[in-house]
Image (cartoon, helix red, strand yellow):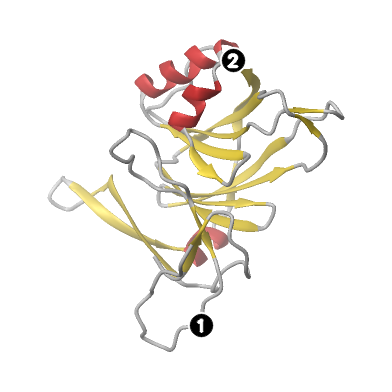
């Protein structure tokens, strides 16, 4: 991945047009009939036409611990999740039964934005999924978090959406900050914190390095 920082660091949004350096596997069939790796740039995703968000759901989560296990942390208050397997949906729906039946995972993926800042004093819903840009099965999520006053009661909320044709969510744009979620769980079965794009100035042809947290 080109120059980036851990979530929570500060700095300009990103070095425009840098290669994400993430590969999608088991999505596009190769000539031999097996899975082929696909390289996608940030420019590809930003230029892609937004796709329709279907089957959007908003729920309070009764078991935030399960939510933490399924989410990629985006700082202290937000988490990003992607559901591609029925087993993961079952775990999620056990923590939030109001989600209802599982969407059709054969045609796409379920993405979700979680917030465990507490109950908003204003009563307004604190998060919103706006749109997803889709390019060859890879996605860029655009979403918002509404700041304000929250009660420290441990309440967690979740907004989900089904996106047809989505295989892997590579980038999340939250209030203008770009995060790159991990695609693999760690040895504890949790997703590491997402990377946040930080300042970078690289000469032509230079290899990407990673800034300190």
Residue at label 2? Answer: 62
Q: Closest to the observer: 54 or 152? A: 152
Q: Quadrant of residue 20?
A: bottom left
- Rendered residue at 39%/31% (across/down): 84
Q: Quadrant of residue 189?
A: top left
- Identify whether 60 is placed above or below 120: above
Residue furthest bottom as drawn = 203
> How far from the left and from the top, in percent, is residue 90?
42, 16
> How far from the left and from the top, in percent, is residue 120?
79, 29
Disc 2 is placed on an element classified as loop
Badge 2 crowding class, 10 Å Cα cut-off, few under 14, some 14 to 19, many 20 or more, is some
- Rendered residue at 58%/61% (across/down): 9
Left or right side of 116 for 90 = left
Residue at label 1? Answer: 201
Q: Closest to the observer: 91 or 156? A: 156
Left or right side of 173 for 188 = left
- Rendered residue at 20%/51% (across/down): 30
- Identify whether 208 is placed above or below 128: below
> How far from the left and from the top, in percent, is residue 73?
51, 42
């Amino acid at each position: 991945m080109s120059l980036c920082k851990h979530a929570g660091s500060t700095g300009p949004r990103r070095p425009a047009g840098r290669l994400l350096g993430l590969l999608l596997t088991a999505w596009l069939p190769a000539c031999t009939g097996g899975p082929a790796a696909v390289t996608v740039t940030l420019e590809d995703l930003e230029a892609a036409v937004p796709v329709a968000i279907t089957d959007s759901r908003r729920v309070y989560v009764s078991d935030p611990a399960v939510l933490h296990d399924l989410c990629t942390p985006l700082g202290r208050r937000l988490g990003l999740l992607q559901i591609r397997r029925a087993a993961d949906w079952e775990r999620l729906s056990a923590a939030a039964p109001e989600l209802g039946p599982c969407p059709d995972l054969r045609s796409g993926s379920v993405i979700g934005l979680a917030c465990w800042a507490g109950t908003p004093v204003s009563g307004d819903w604190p998060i919103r999924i706006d749109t997803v840009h889709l390019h060859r099965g890879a996605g860029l999520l655009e979403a918002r978090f509404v700041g304000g006053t929250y009660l420290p009661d441990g309440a967690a909320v979740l907004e989900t959406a089904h996106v047809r044709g989505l295989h892997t969510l590579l980038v999340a744009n939250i209030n203008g900050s770009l995060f790159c979620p991990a695609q693999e769980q760690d040895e504890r079965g949790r997703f590491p914190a997402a990377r946040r794009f930080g300042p970078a100035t690289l000469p032509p042809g230079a290899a990407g390095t990673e800034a300190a947290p």
